[in-house]
Image (tube, grey):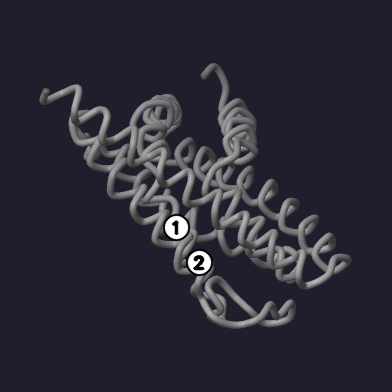
């Protein structure tokens, strides 16, 4: 990068495109925001996502993160299984829709959403692949400007996720308040099914890669 100013601008734009792509984090944001809690789910999920990306950024900056590509199918299988389990638990969790206080899976509080953001990040094999390829390239370019470059890259990247997920959360929250609880429950179930479909895709892709490699 030719100037320091390019780092936050390009990092923010790349984060926007990534956050707007349909995936487990976006689907979970839609699901949790359907309970009508304004921007809270999006902000807390993005905070968890940022906490997951902080150590990865540091490890890449110091050249300490290097995962063999042959391990990716295992990550796909494990990550897919975690997403499927999350969806199943949320679908069959007893209890009614409570727009005021309910949190993921019916658990109240701030930390469950943050932890969920961390878990979803690490369970997504494409997230890991992105950081070991595109993310690693960005970190190497930011390193030209030292610690300041890395700091600008990281916070600009997380700001992109925060903006997108916050806006999605706000929009879904307003929409949820205008529909009946039956339709709201259907929406939440559909989101959980989408998460399970994504998890199934991850597992099938991982299994296919293992079969191709060893048979």
Residue drawn at (54%, 60%) of the image = 47
Residue drawn at (40%, 44%) of the image = 200
What secondary structure is found at the residue carrying circle 2? helix
Residue projecting furthest to the top: 2
Residue projecting furthest to the left: 214
Which quadrant does the C terminus fall into?
top left
Residue drawn at (27%, 43%) of the image = 75
Q: Which mark is residue 114?
A: 2
Above or below, 73 relative to 110: above
Above or below, 108 relative to 181: below
Q: Which mark is residue 28?
A: none
Q: Earlier in the sequence, mark 1 or mark 2?
A: 1
Task: Compare residues 164 and 13 and report the one nearer the observer.
Answer: 164
Whether residue 172 sits left or right of residue 130 in the image: it is: right
Residue 5 at x, y = what percent? 62, 29
Q: Are marks 1 and 2 in contact (CB under 8 Å)?
A: yes
Residue, disc 1: 51
Task: Compare residues 158 and 76 and report the one nearer the observer.
Answer: 76
For the residues labelled 1 and 2, the Cα–Cα distance comes to 9 Å
What secondary structure is found at the residue carrying circle 1? helix
Residue 1 at x, y = what percent? 51, 19
């Amino acid at each position: 990068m030719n100037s320091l100013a390019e780092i936050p601008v390009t990092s923010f734009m790349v984060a926007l495109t990534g956050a707007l792509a349909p995936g487990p984090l976006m689907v979970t944001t839609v699901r949790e925001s359907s309970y009508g809690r304004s921007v809270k789910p999006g902000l807390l999920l993005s905070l968890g996502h940022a906490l997951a990306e902080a150590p990865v950024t540091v490890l890449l900056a110091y050249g300490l993160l290097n995962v063999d590509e042959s391990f990716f199918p295992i990550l796909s299988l494990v990550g897919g299984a975690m997403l499927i389990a999350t969806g199943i638990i949320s679908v069959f969790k007893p209890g009614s829709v409570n727009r005021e206080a309910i949190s993921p899976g019916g658990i109240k509080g701030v930390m469950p959403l943050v932890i969920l953001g961390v878990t979803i990040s690490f369970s997504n094999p494409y997230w890991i692949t992105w950081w070991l390829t595109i993310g690693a390239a960005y970190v190497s370019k930011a390193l030209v400007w030292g610690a300041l470059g890395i700091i600008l890259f990281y916070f600009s990247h997380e700001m992109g996720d925060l903006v997108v997920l916050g806006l999605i959360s706000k929009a879904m929250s307003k929409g949820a308040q205008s529909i009946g609880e039956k339709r709201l429950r259907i929406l939440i179930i559909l989101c959980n099914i989408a998460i399970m479909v994504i998890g199934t895709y991850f597992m099938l892709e991982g299994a296919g890669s293992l079969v191709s490699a060893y048979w």
